[in-house]
Image (cartoon, rainbow, N blue to C red):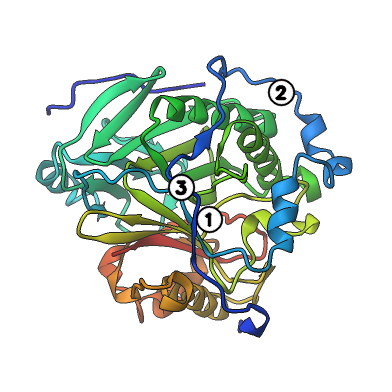
Amino acid sequence: MNTRTARDTRSTTCDTSSHPARPTLRDVSADVSVDVSADVSADVSADVSADVGVDTWRDSARPTVRDVRADRDRPTLRDVSADRVPDSTRLRAVQASDTDLDCLLRRHQGRILRPTQFLRPDEAPRPGMEPVWISPLADKRYELLVTDALTREDLVGGVLVRFAADLAYFEVRIDDTADLTATTEAAYSRIFQVTQHLAAYRLLRLWNYVPCILRGADDQERYRLFNAGRFAAWQQHGPKDDQGDPLYPAATGIGAHGGPLVIQVLLTRQRVDYVQNYRQVPSACYSRKFGVRPPVFARGSLRRGGDFSDLIVSGTASIVGEETAHTCMRAQSAETVRNLQALLSRKNLGGTSFSLLGFHSVRAYVKHPEDLPEAQFELERHISPEHIIYLLDDICRPGLLLEVEGIAA
């Protein structure tokens, strides 16, 4: 497992009638429990067959999924608030091409949480950038996750963590992904070991870059193997509420054309509400046909700063209920926009709402390059093109052609 070391930082219509009116906020108190043993190591046993076998689908390892599915009145939001902290910072992603990167690096010097470079095959990463093996579809090929506060770095549990006001960020990379279930379980166990040292922080956002995500058939598909490892680690070590239900933040699970398994972690000391979408089944409740273990994430994370709120939006695609909707890019992109609008709506969030006009720091993952014009046409009717970076990538289901994520402010 590769961890970073410290360095000098100076330099589709859904019938909603079956969903009764329900509250959108569940208070699970500030005392969220995280069950992580002090001796959890990165070398988690690769033997997780007892956790991922088909015969265990109905066993006691999955009580919370069955409970959630049966509970039709489960609220949309999960309150995992910590004590309010006075220092908070706005968060945004600044996207750049080769021609303007140096200028933006100087402008935001000392305030960059994550400097990302999207790599085409056979390209080498630029010094100082953190590579992600996803090809850019246009000139924009860099993304700087920046804040209004100065950043600092420290080693926490042997992992380099960057801090800025209420935010903290780190990543885990593992080169050996032959046994992807064991690799993923080890990576997430390592993540939870680090977050144990950051007890005042709550998970805000996760990015999962899975090499060759759709390789393999049926339950041997790599995305399903990844989900099995993530599920096992979360059940054993992940954060849970006072009732023992796992607390899942916003996340993206996306393919990569090469490189290691990369998991990026963003945390906050501010109050966080984990948000679902009334048009979609919570991912943890997906039926067996999507894998032995389900993907586990919220549709968004609502962070409430001192004088602002922002909604960190998970990878969102043309899924209604739990089914992939439509087979062409034009229809899928329109359905994706409808899902985004529903997620941001007052109906979904209760007393808060956002607009796509305030949607920024947007990534649009496109499966086929020839579909890019259709995706641009639909997305740029609602979102400013200056806020979108287009990336060529495999998405987590064979039938999905587009996935969109971002931040609503």
Q: Is residue 384 above or below residue 4?
A: below
Find residue 113 and report its horizontal and vertical position in percent.
Answer: 27, 39
Q: Nearer the viewer, residue 301 or 389?
A: 301
Please tell me whether mark 3 or mark 1 is closer to you in this view: 3
Amino acid type, mark 3: Ser
Disc 1: which residue: 298
What is the C-alpha distance between the residues marked 3 and 2?
35 Å
Q: Quadrant of the C terminus?
A: bottom left
Find residue 145 and report its horizontal and vertical position in percent.
Answer: 28, 47
Name the side, left or right, on which 268 lies relative to 43: left
Please tell me whether mark 3 or mark 2 is closer to you in this view: 3
- Marks counted in the figure total 3
Disc 3: which residue: 29
Characterize the local packing of mark 3: few (<14), some (14-19) or many (20 or more) Cα atoms within 10 angstroms.
few
What is the C-alpha distance between the residues marked 2 and 1?
27 Å
Residue drawn at x 43%, y 79% as measured from the top left: 378
Q: Disc number at residue 46?
A: 2
